[in-house]
Image (cartoon, rainbow, N blue to C red):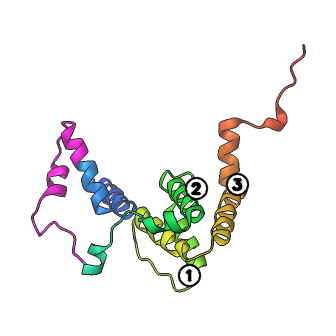
Amino acid sequence: MKSKILHIALRIALIQEEFSETEISEAVNLLQEAGVTSNLFTYLSSNNSKFQPKSFSSKAKSESPKTQIPIDLKNNEPEKYKLLIEFESSLKNKEILIESVEIRRLCESLDKNFFSSKKSRLDLIHQLIQLLISRTVEEIATIINEVKNKEKEDPYYKLSTFLIDGDSSHKPEVEE
């Protein structure tokens, strides 16, 4: 019984690490609107301070968890804006850098002073985009290409491609 409770606690902790409080709240609201009820939803949406997570700083509250690429960048540097929007979209759709740790490593490689403790994936994407905004279009393009090429060299990527598409080098020849 205790292992089951520990398993549930770990799953909840993983959800809290991967998603922002806003995302979790929106998901709970969506389920409630669909008619799904649970004591967990009541707990998550309660205003009881005993159950609310501790706030750490006003700075953390003021930062939006969503990536915000400045609009003036669209007018002043449209190519950079387009690159960043496409990269952000790929990240959010988990097409590249699927794990949060991969985004964190990229941020650390771009800024040696980068430090991030247990932030959601969306927060890490925001920080990564902020690091890239100060770079030139050429640097951004190079970084994005390196990320995409590295993904393709990853043994897990190769395995998943093989499992999904099969091995094209061993296709049987069809006689006509």
Residue underneath mark 3: 152
Numbered marks: total:
3
The quarter of the image holding the C terminus is top right
Most extreme residue toward the right, as rendered? Answer: 176
- Residue 146 is drawn in which quadrant? bottom right
* Relative vertical location of residue 49 with respect to residue 23 in this rendering, above or below: below
Location of residue 94 with respect to 16 vertically, above or below:
above
| Left or right: 94 as drawn, with respect to 21 | right
Answer whether residue 56 is magenta in the image.
no
Mark 1, secondary structure of its residue: loop
Q: Is 90 on the left-hand or right-hand side of 42?
A: right
Q: What residue type is labelled 1?
A: Asp
Q: Which residue is drawn at 84% across and 37% down?
A: 169
Range of residues picked out in magenta: 29-55
How packed is label 3: few (under 14 Cα within 10 Å), some, or many (20 or more)? some
Q: How far apart are marks 3 and 1 (CA)?
A: 24 Å
Question: According to the image, label 1 marks what residue?
Answer: 111
Badge 2 or badge 1: first in the primary sequence: 2
Give SS at disc 3: helix
In-image side of 164 versus 122 (left or right): right
Mark 2 sits on what residue?
A: 96
Amino acid of disc 3: Lys
Who's the residue at 31% across and 55% down the image?
8
Circles 2 and 1, Cβ within 8 Å, touching? The answer is: no
Residue at 55% in and 55% down: 86
Calculate the distance from the C-alpha at mark 2 to the C-alpha at mark 3.
10 Å
Q: Name the spot of residue 25 as percent of width and height, x first.
A: 24, 55
Where residue 31 appears, x then y in whole percent?
24, 42
Sequence-wise first label, 3 or 1: 1
* Three-letter residue code for mark 2: Ile
Closest to the observer, 11 or 96: 96
Residue reaching furthest front? 75
